[in-house]
Amino acid sequence: MPQYAVARYLGIDAARQPAFSSDGERLTFVRDTTGTPQIWTLAGANAPPTRLTAFEERISFIDWSPTRDEFVFGMDQGSDERDQLFRYDAADGTIHGLTERPDAIHGWGGWSPSGDSFAFTSNRRDAQAFDVYVQTRDGGPDDAELVFESDGWLEALGWSPDGESLALREAHASFDQEVSILELETGEVGVVTPDGEASYDCVTFGPGSDVLYLVTNHDADRSYLGRLDLDTADIDVVADGDGGDGNWNVEEFAFDRDSRRLVYGRNVDGYSELYAGEFVDETAVDVAEVDLPEGVAADVTLGPDGERFAFTFSENSEPFGIYVGTVDGTSEPTRWTSLDTVGIPQSTFRSAETIRYESFDGRVSEANATTGEQSSPDRREIPAYWTLPADAEPGETPVIVDIHGGPEHQRRPWFYPTKQYFLNEGYAVLEPNVRGSSGYGKTYTHLDDREKRMDSVKDIRAAVDWLYEHDMVDPDRIVAYGRSYGGFMVLAAITEYPEIWAAAVEFVGIADFETFLENTGEWRRDHRAAEYGSLDDRELLREISPIHKVDRIECPLFVQHGANDPRVPVGETEQIVERVRERGVPVEKLVFEDEGHHTTTRSNLVEEFEQIRAFLDEHV
């Protein structure tokens, strides 16, 4: 099979975040053709795209005005996640800075219905509190009006149809959120969601200002599309994830108030289903399943008249691109952005098989889902994606165990250029969704909280046991690999089970939960404490921190970090590398001064993975 350099794979474009112009005639999206994500536009399928921005820094989002030929976009510096807001005039291409406070984070809160103003949240006043601001579209950086002072991590979700209030969300933890309504004239804020742990996503006002539609798991293990009455706090189910293939999470809800058309999705074992149609009354919808390839759909958005919808689509063998279809089904979704694989035949890209392997503990029945108590002697099964290279030989195939971050994230069968590169190099790839992952219900997500943290590491050990039984695998060439929380999982796996790894590669991982919580962004500390434990319980933090078990590490280690990382400070890498070197174990460190939690510049990515390739060539 032909071999291709990693730069070829990393040169494959990814197009995401579609957004229709206010007149519906153009579609903008973010694409990384130039090496960093920039804004592009096109007028139809296979039409030549036009690039609208040419920055060296990445663009984070686009939102078109509902009434004018302009949009707002976000951009940070050096991947530091301190987004600033800019207004782009589509008539003449001029760009206007709206915030210019590089020391603060700005979270987009949406345009007012008239398009005259917009809302955002920012921690300008207090590093750990996100206040709510409203600013006129043509206002300067000093013209923002502080309309509500917060004491935590607050997001503005959008305006009411009458323009008199804003929906806000405060997250105490990933699955412990509450939604409130801010009355702009009086400044009064009231929580409108019922008591009880729940998440609230895709929140939007209904045709009036007395109802919210949202995706939530309130009083349920799986997420559903619900209608929240703001007067009573009652949530009625509009659509759930139940089907012939089981009960799964609803996701990706988009709604047009005027036409009452909607699109929503189901996450079925990581794969997407989309449904499109319209509301027939306030709690009932008439929808049909969209004819969609097997893969993952995200970033679903509706055009201004609700007739068309766009979304990002990807699957193992198809890079991220933008699709557009009609809600009434008269036009099946088609890919609008070009499919460019930089000369690598698409037929060489390998697709994953969904597998499940047994872990160490018993399965939980639906009846005991709220308590998490074991009710069956059967072993709990962990979902995972398994991909073999084209030239796999029995007993000779090295394996990369790729552990996702989050921790409440879900590995899904989308396109990873680096995964396809490693497959081309002859590695098999196993991608487990260990306990704590999202996508499989609230109960499953809580199985690794606080004192149960190391149970998820046991799931990695069980994954390797599954590999030992596979006749294609070389058991002496298994690599632990992961980013962010996945980086912690790598460090935990090579300290808890040092004898099973040939090498380890970790990116921006947590080595010491005490120093991580002390030094992470102040707005993130309480949120993460709900998952990992707080600084008030340092004994627990020490028990789960790999830094205290460095003497157990036996395999060579490669560590990467960005100096501007606001989530996991670079000190986590510095201390683990220093301690491993003291033991005489081979360790390599790569720190980019112009990157943060994610490596976003293509030239840096190429350097990063060329070094990883050399590291694995030497040790695996």
Image (cartoon, rainbow, N blue to C red):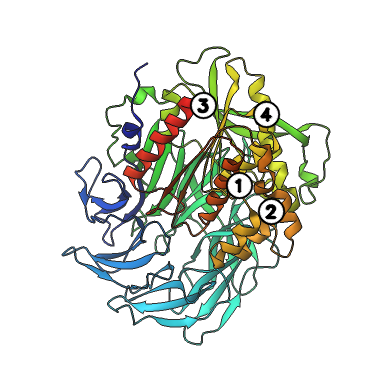
Q: Earlier in the sequence, mark 3 or mark 1?
A: 1
Q: Give x and y (percent) for residue 459.
A: 68, 36
Badges 1 and 2: C-beta atoms under 8 Å apart?
no
Q: CA distance from mark 3 to mark 1?
A: 33 Å
Badges 2 and 3: C-beta atoms under 8 Å apart?
no
Q: Residue at x 67, y 19 (%)?
A: 469
Quickly name the residue at label 4: 499
- Under circle 4, the secondary element is helix
Quickly name the residue at label 3: 619
Query: Is residue 533 something that shows in the picture?
Result: yes
- Please name whichever residue, 66 or 525, is drawn nearer the observer in this view of the structure: 525
Q: Examine the rendered structure and indicate whether residue 272 appears above or below residue 158.
A: above
Q: Earlier in the sequence, mark 1 or mark 4?
A: 1
Q: Residue at x 63, y 65 (%)?
A: 526
Quickly name the residue at label 1: 438
* Amino acid at the residue labelled 4: Glu
Quadrant in the rendering for residue 12: top left
Badges 2 and 4: C-beta atoms under 8 Å apart?
no
At label 2, counting other C-alpha atoms closer than 10 Å, the crowd grade (few under 14, some 14-19, many 20 or more) is: some
* Amino acid at the residue labelled 3: His
Q: Give x and y (percent) for residue 595.
A: 40, 53
Frontmost of labels 2 and 3 is 3
Q: Earlier in the sequence, mark 3 or mark 4?
A: 4
Q: Examine the rendered structure and indicate whether residue 349 appears above or below residue 78.
A: above
Query: Is residue 292 something that shows in the picture?
Result: no
Q: Earlier in the sequence, mark 1 or mark 2?
A: 2
